[in-house]
Amino acid sequence: MMKQIYANPDLCTGCKLCSIACATTKFGVANPRKGAIIVRQNLYARYEFQSLCRHCDPAPCMDACMTGCIERDANGVVRLDASRCVGCWMCVMVCPYDAIARDLEIQVARKCDLCPDRAAPACVTVCPTEALMWAEAGVQNVKRET
Amino acid sequence: MKHTPITPRPLATLAHVDLTTRRVEISETPPDVVRKFVGGRGLNMYYLYKYLKPNTDALAPANPLILGTGILTGTGAPNSGRHSVTTKSPESGILGDSNIGGFLGPELRYAGIDRLLITGKADKPVYLYVEDGRVEIRDAQGYWGTNCTEATTRFKNALGADVEVELIGTAGENQVRYAATRYGLKNSAGRCGTGAVWGSKNLKAVVARGNRGLPLAHPEEFFAKAVELRKYLQQSKVIQVLGRVGTPLLYDVSNYLGAIRTHNSQKTTFEDTLNAEEIHHYVDKMLSCAGCVVHCRHRNSLGGEGPEYTSEVLVGANIGVSDTAQVIELQNIVNELGLDVSSVGTYLAWAIELYERGMLDKKMTDGKELRFGDYATLKRLIYDIAARRGLGDLLAEGSRLVDRFPGAEGFLIAIKGLPQSDPHDVRYLKGFALGIATSSRGADHLRSRPTLEIFDLPAEFTQQVYGQPVDPNPTSYRSKAVVVTFSETIYAVVDCVGICKFICHGFNSPRNLNYDHFRELIYLATGLEFSKEELVNVGRRVVDLERVINMREGITRKDDTLPARYFDETMTGRKTQGHHIDRAQFAQMLDEFYALHGWDKEGQPPRERVAEFEAL
C-alpha cells in the first residue's frame, strides 16, 4: 500500500522547518516558500496547520494542468515536472487542499513528490514535534519512521 | 532535481535607507568584515561604530537604526529565526541593542537583504517594503495611531497574508523612551527603547516578502546536521521543560530560593500564583519562532502570547499584582501597546515606592494613589504611558527622571540608565550581579547571565560548562569573573550567528550548542571555515567594540555598578535572607573581569584594539 504524509495540526507549532527542509533537500536553498508543504498560520485568528498534497485519485491538478507537466507515476504519486511548468497557477487554483506552492522567484508550481529517494520525506524527518507522520494510507495513530 | 536557478547573492548585503532624502543604496558587506564580525549583533556594532557620531541625540534623525540578521538566520539551523535591532538608546543614552525572534529576520534574507541601516527622518509616517532585492519607502499615514495587532492585520490585509511585519505600536510613535520593536503578538526587540527610535524617524513598520532561495553551500549535509542537532537538543531536560511550560519554569526555582524581585526589590519572595503550573492553566498552545525546535512561546487564553518569566515578575511580583489572570492581562496590554515589559514593570514599581516615600505627590500623579497590587490603577497607567497622558507622560521619560527627583535614583533598579530585565534579585547570585553590572546595554541578563549558577551544581559539572575549575558556590565572589566572561563571549557569538540563546551552551544547559556546533553549521551553510579560536575571538571583538562605543558615549568604570539597594540593603526571603553585595568584593570581581578582558583598571580596552577598530 502507498505510504502517505499525515499531518496533526494540534502538534504544529508553526516553525516552518518542514517547508525549509523541503526546499533545502530539493533545491539546495532555504526558503519555506519554495517548499511543497505549506504551513499556514494566523497568530491573531490563533491557528496553524500544514497544507500538504494527498496525491488524490483522480487528481484535479493533473486535469487542470495545461502543459501536462503533472503526472501520476507507477507508484501512484502525483508528480510535477517543473521544467515544463509555465506558472499559469491552474493547479494551485483547483487543488482542494490548497497544497500546491508557487515559487515566485522563477514562476513555477511546487508540489510534493513524497521524496522517493529518501527513507522518509524530509519534512517528516525534520519536524521537531511529530506533527507530521509517514505511514501507510489508512493506518491511524502510527509512530513516524525517520 | 536541482534545476532552480539561484539568484546569486553575496555573503552579506546591506540596504542603507535614508528617510530624509528617500534614497536607498544596496551594497555588499566586505567579506573581510564578515570574517571579523560574522553577522547579527556583531555586524550591527560594526555599522553602529561607523555611523553613530558620539553624543548624537538618540531621537534625532542622525541616529542610525540597524536591523541585522545573523549568518545562519533563516537557514533552517535549529532556532535560527533571530535578528538584532541596534541603535543608540533613547532610554539609556548609550549603545542600544536588542535581539528578536519571530519571522521577519528570515524573510529579509529570503528577500536578499541581510541588513537594513536606516538613517534620517521621513517627513510623514512611512513603512519599508522589502521584496526580492529592493527596498521601497511607502506611505504609512493610514497605519499611524494603531497598535500592534491592528496595524499588522491591516498590513496583511493590504499586502497579502504571507508578508512578515515588524513594527511599533502607539508607544513607539509617541517616543516613549522604552518602546519596543514588535513582531506578532509578543516577539520583541524590547530593550533599550528601539521602538522610540522608529517613532522618531516616522517609521511605522518594516514589511518583507522574500521569494528567493537562500543558497546553502552543502545542503544535504546541512540538512542532516540540522536533524542531528535537533535530536540532540531535544534530549535535554531543560529544552523539554521549556517546550512544555516556557520560561515561567524559573519562577518556581527562584521564588523557592527567595530571589524574586518583589515590590521594587524591597522584598524577595512572592506568591505561588505565578508558578509555571498556575500560568499553564491559561495556555492554549506552545508556539515556535522560525526554525525553532524548542517552542517556548505561549498562546494564552486571554488573547495574547506569553507570559515569560520576565513579564510575570515585572508586571506581577514587582508591582504587587498576584492574580494570575491579571498579570497575563497586563503583559498582553504592554505587548499590544509596544512597550518593553522589563522597563514598564521597573518604572511602575519605582513610582509606587517614590509615592509611598512622599517623593511623588498627588499633584504629579493626577490625584491617584499609587499602591503595590492596585491592578486597576496600574493598568490605566500603562495605557497612559503609551499615550503620554498625565503621569504617564512623565513616566514615559523613564530613567531620565532621576535628574528631576533628587534622591530617587537610589530606588531605581537600573544600571547605566536601563532597568534590570532579570526577575532574579541578583544580591544572592554574585555572578548574576557582575553580569548585569558590566553588560554593554545596561542592567540586562541576556548579555552574560551564567544562568546555571542558580542550580547549585557540583564542581565537576561547572568545570565541564566553563572549561576550567570555578567556584561552584553561587554566593561566592571567587571566579565569577571567569563565569561571566565565558558567558558574555559565547552569547555575543550566538547573537552574531542568529540563533536563539535558549539552545546556547551555558545559557540553559552545558549540552546545548557550542562553538564547534556553530562552526560546523556556518561551514555547511556558507562554506566559510572558522576555527573555534576564531569564533571566540569574534565574541571578544564584539564585546570590545561595544565597550569602545560606550566609552565614546561617556561610560567609565563608575558606571559598571549596581543599584544602591543591592549594596546597602539585605534580601528578605528564605535561603537568601541577609544577602547583599559587598562593595569591596564587588570591586575586586570587577578588577578580575577587566583583567580577563585585557582592559585596564578603568575598563579601557588596550590601544591596539582601539586602533584595530579605527582602521575599519
Image: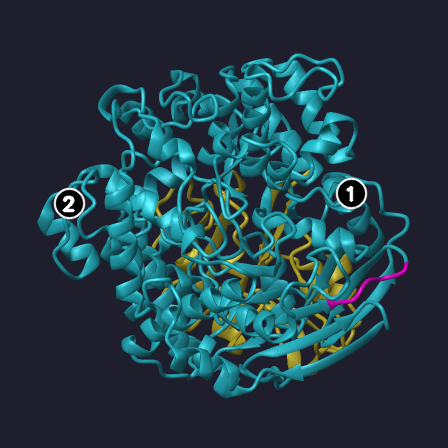
- The front one of B576 and B598 is B598
- Magenta segment boundaries in residue numbering: B119-123
Q: Nearer the viewer, residue B97 or B245?
A: B97
Q: Which amino acid does label 2 sit on?
A: Pro
Q: How crowded is mark 1: few (under 14 residues within 10 Å), some or many (20 or more)?
A: many
Q: Name the residue under label 1.
A: B174
Direction from residue B514 to residue A81 in the image, left or right:
right
**Amino acid on which disc 1 is placed:** Asn
Q: Eyeballing the image, is B30 above or below B437? A: below
B446 sits to left or right of B141: left
Residue B47 visible: yes
Residue B472 numbered tag: 2
Q: Which chain carries label 1?
A: B
Residue shown at 77%/59% (left/top)?
A: A93
Chain given the colour yellow: A
Indicate yes or no whether the magenta region holds residue B121: yes
What colouring method underlies this structural image?
by chain
Residue A18: image location, x then y, percent: 50, 58
Write down the quadrant of residue B407 in the picture: top right
Could you say which quadrant of the image residue B528 lies in?
Answer: bottom left
Q: Which chain is cyan?
A: B
In the rendered view, tell whether residue B406 sits above or below residue B225. above
Indicate whether residue B434 is drawn in magenta: no
* Same chain, labels 2 and 1: yes
